[in-house]
Image (cartoon, coloured by chain):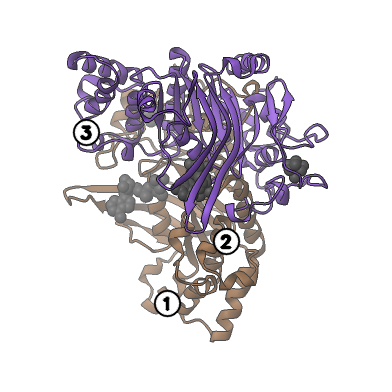
Chain colours: A purple, B brown
Amino acid sequence: MVKAHSAERTSKTAAAGSRQALMSVRGLGIRFKTAQGIWQATRKIDFDIAPGERVGIVGESGCGKTITGLSILRLLPNNLSGLDGSIMFDDVDLASCSTRTMRGIRGRRIAMIFQEPMSALDPVFTVGHQIAETLRVHTDVGKEEARAQTIDMLRRVGIASPERRIDEYPHQLSGGMRQRVMIAAALICGPQLLIADEPTTALDVTVQAQILDLLRNLSETSKTALMLITHDLGVVAETCTRMITMYAGEVIEDAAVDAALVRPLHPYTSGLLRSLPHLSPRLGRLPSIPGRVPSIAEMPDGCRFKARCPHATAGCEAEQELLDAGEGRKVRCWRFRELELPGALQHAATAPIAGRVVRQ
Amino acid sequence: MMPLAGDSRDPIVSVRDLEVGFQTMDRRATVKAVDGVSFDVRRGETFGIIGESGSGKTTIGRALVFLLKPTAGAILHNGVDPQTLPRKQFQSHRRDYQIIFQDPNAALNPRMTIISSVLEPLELAGAGTKAERLARAQEAMERVGLPQELGERYPHQLSGGQKQRVIIARALTLRPRLIVCDEVVAALDMSIRGDVLNLFAELQRDLGLTYVFITHDLSVVSHISDRIAVMYLGRFVELGPTESVSGRPLHPYTQALLSAEPLPLPSTMRSDRRIILQGEMPSPIDPPSGCRFRTRCQYAQSVCAEQTPAWRELEPDHWVACHFADRPNFSPS
Ligand SMILES: Nc1ncnc2c1ncn2[C@@H]1O[C@H](COP(=O)(O)OP(=O)(O)OP(=O)(O)O)[C@@H](O)[C@H]1O
Ligand SMILES: Nc1ncnc2c1ncn2[C@@H]1O[C@H](COP(=O)(O)OP(=O)(O)OP(=O)(O)O)[C@@H](O)[C@H]1O
Ligand code: SF4
Ligand code: SF4
Ligand SMILES: [Mg+2]
Ligand SMILES: [Mg+2]
């Protein structure tokens, strides 16, 4: 089922490019004022999200996933010094539109949920109040109608006896239920895009599976596009159709999930897949990527992965652009055509998960 | 009393009917965080413990290194409960048992240099002369692959992986025999997790260490462990060799847990047979009667509410607590 989707998406993106996109991000760069001066946290971020598409944004801590998500809703912290590029969402440039226009979009056409539902929910208001409030700010439904719609939405996100739960306070709910409430609040206005930043990281695996299932189903039935930010490649594989990999503030690969897992084009994506314990022989040595992500202060010229890349060579110190690799794929590595990089497939056979892998 | 898993082999620690209770905040109730757990940790092995948040993993870990006292039951070393030893002897004995926690930032004093942090446990223990202590600290740093010049730096000048190595070096200075590793790679980035896991494996090989490896990351636990114990609401529900537990899980909770793990595989290689559990773990203040998993178990029968399932060895060295785990057609009804 997931596979059919990704194949379809791939051809769509390839054929239509940005014309069909719901959202089109171009040259996005985020700068912060810090005690050390101006920090360029991300730059040259390009990607599209098609209507109803589910896109995973992956990468290690600090690579810029969260601030990219926040920039779409202009929720960046106060010490923002500048935003470059454009974020076209149905003919509106979110990077430069008026505050008033943004207010009409935020929460209504684009919604966002976070890792820690407790910090996003107001402890002094009931669950129902917080969800109905969103609805009443953005639409002109009456009190009764808002309550009815809220109960319906709580039911859709899998909360049992919503008639009772609607009058409870956040602290009366478990972590998983709070995240469901957040999702209900985010989806109550029927947004076209839901940005979810690590929505399951704080949850247990069995609850995570419930929430991911819910997000996938809701996105499918309501045609809401999903931008899922996570550092877990498994979460992306289970939930999304496309995967955008970031490294040190840049997009370095953009491909259908299956394509990226089977045959990654960027040495960093390949290295990440190889380092996962799922895919290595038990008790054997785990391949790892030597070194660490350069900090903003020591960012090298040219390829930002150069110091850790086993394929680095003369030419890699040149500025790397996000190249079109065909079939809707993009990669920021000029050597991608000559490199034959291993993906998840090569390792799965000998790994501890082998017994759980379907053989063709 | 529970029969024991693998008592034939050389145990470094024997845990017998361990119970640990805590008062709730309002002091009105007791949480039995660990409620009747028995197992042996064998010398030189990695004993993995997995289970949901709040199931009692950390509590077991802390009891193993004497950071908290059992409410009932015993933790025996060579048949002796070390807490009954004279104070001085106990203090030196407990140094053989160390614990490393998840967050390297919380564990390091930001105002102390790295080398002072590594030296600290030795100084507290009053071991050897100053020069000997420094030599031992430097040896430990080298052991975990930290260059000596990092010793003069402060924690904020190190990467996450380096900080976790400092914590490991610190634990190694006392030359422990057993280390409880509690979520030690959870805070680390994906690309350096492998490095730290490799280091643990290498240290075990070279120093003959025993690990109790606590995590809720299934891929990590099945990579590093020789045996895996699965915890649910204060009790073990399954225990066995890693291959058997991850390949042929016997308990319905283990089956659900394994099937819930998101796998980084293309869709053609993933099976669709996911067991999505309903609900979440009940409160440990008022656990369900009989089998504690029954409120979420798709196979639950009335006997499951009435009787606590026995802890049985259904396959060699593979233990499980479920009334029906030995039924041949134990599959979705
Ligand atoms: N307010 C700020 N001022 C200065 N720098 C910031 C600010 N917020 C974020 N950054 C920096 O921007 C970069 C990207 O941060 P971001 O939070 O987007 O990372 P992330 O990819 O979401 O990481 P994680 O996986 O840890 O959540 C980091 O280097 C971070 O230190
Ligand atoms: N010092 C304490 N005082 C009161 N209750 C406690 C204390 N320590 C733990 N608990 C309770 O005991 C139970 C088990 O906690 P424990 O920390 O051992 O779980 P865990 O399996 O390690 O969970 P996690 O995966 O979240 O770390 C929980 O219900 C917890 O709230
Ligand atoms: S550009 Fe060079 S250094 Fe960068 S990823 Fe490609 S091969 Fe490696
Ligand atoms: S004892 Fe009953 S409720 Fe418990 S796991 Fe077995 S079948 Fe399920
Ligand atoms: Mg983030
Ligand atoms: Mg714990």
Of the numbered discs 1 and 2, the one sitting upstream in the chain is 1
Identified at 29% across, 42% down, the residue is B284
Three-letter code for the amino acid on which mark 3 is drawn? Tyr
SS for dot 2: helix
Q: Which residue is mark 2?
A: B165
- Tell me if mark 3 has few (under 14), some (14-19) or many (20+) residues whose alpha carbon lies within 10 angstroms of its own: some
A190 and A342: which is toward the camera: A190
Q: CA distance from mark 1 to mark 3?
A: 52 Å
Residue A57 in percent (x, y) is at 55, 33
Tell which of A19 and A9 is nearer to you. A19
Looking at the image, is mark 1 or mark 2 nearer the viewer?
2
Q: Which numbered marker is on residue B170?
A: none
- Picture quadrant of residue B66: bottom left
Residue in the picture at 81% in, 44% down: A315
Chain assignment, label 3: A
Rounded to the nearest whole Å, what is the CA distance between mark 1 and mark 2? 29 Å
Q: Which residue is mark 1?
A: B89
Cα separation, mark 3 vs mark 2, equals 42 Å
Q: Position of residue A145 (x, y in %)?
A: 22, 13
Q: Is residue A173 left or right of residue B232?
A: left
- Identify the element where label 3 is drawn: loop
Q: Is A192 placed left or right of A326 in the picture?
A: left
Q: For mark 3, what is the residue? A: A169
**Chain ID at mark 2:** B
